[in-house]
Image (tube, helix red, strand yellow):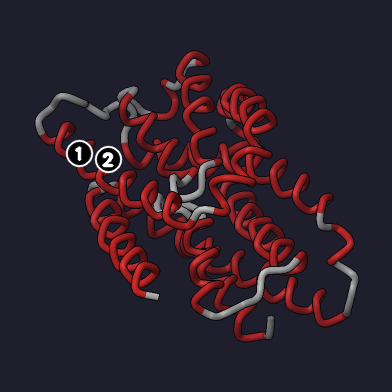
Amino acid sequence: MNFLESLILGIVEGLTEFLPISSTFHLIFVSQFLKIQENDFVKLFHVFIQSGAILSILFLYLKNLKRDLDLVIKTLIAFVPTAVLGAILYRAIKQIFFESYSLMMTIFILVGILFIAFEILVKKNIISPRKTISELSSRDAILVGFFQALSFFPGVSRAGAVILTMMALGYRRADSAYFSFILSIPTMFSASLYDLFKTRNAILSSSQNVFLLCIGFLTAFVVAIVAVKWFISYLQRNTLSLFGAYRFVLGLIVLTLCLLA
């Protein structure tokens, strides 16, 4: 991996981590497109730059969390089922789903179709997302945490799983996105720590590696700040249909290219 590649992957992580389009899917296939050879350092890099994205959420919303103890408690409640299911499913998902690109792309496309179908239900008033984050109950937090665990399957999107679950429970799009950001802090922090511990020997294997990690981290941090602000503003006026269409079209393109290769 070189400087330009680390910069590109940092941008990809920052843009996709908090949007409902699966950062894992994008990192894997952008790495494939750039012909970056998979090794312990590349795996570490993908995990480490997520920390930059996490830091962007703390940078933007730490003051809010200090003033809202109830939201902090609900976040921790939501994290529990995710942590339990993640510990149970982690090994199987890593060994099966991360090794099957066709399965990953199928999931990516199907979730895009689900976004579009979901917005049709909202338009027909079958689903009415009107509640605010201040109305989040402990029961709903547990359900959100349970469905967030689906994001361990590459192609689903952690943000997408949380937003759709909350909208199904009646919460507004922007509030659902906001909670997905806050819930990412314990979720991504714990997952990143675990993966970093497993690949820790690759960090200091060379000074070049440290430099590339810093570039990816800082790039993801800056880009994620811009992406999060834009996403919240977008959802206050628009639906998830654009992201559904994006997933469907991109998934078909990537799937076609893989079949032709």
Can you say whether 58 is above or below 171 in the image? below
Q: Amino acid at mark 1?
A: Ala
Image location (x, y in percent) of residue 143: 47, 21
Q: Residue furthest top?
A: 139
The residue at the point 48 percent across, 63 percent down is 26
Q: Which mark is residue 178?
A: none
Secondary structure of residue under mark 1? helix
Q: Quadrant of the C terminus?
A: bottom left
Q: Residue furthest left?
A: 124
Left or right for 216, reference 35: right
Q: Which mark is residue 117?
A: 1
**Residue 62 at least partly seen:** no
Q: Name the image quarter holding residue 134.
A: top left
List the residue tagged with mark 2. Answer: 114
User: Tags 2 and 1 in contact by the CB under 8 Å rule?
Assistant: yes
Left or right for 211, reference 233: right
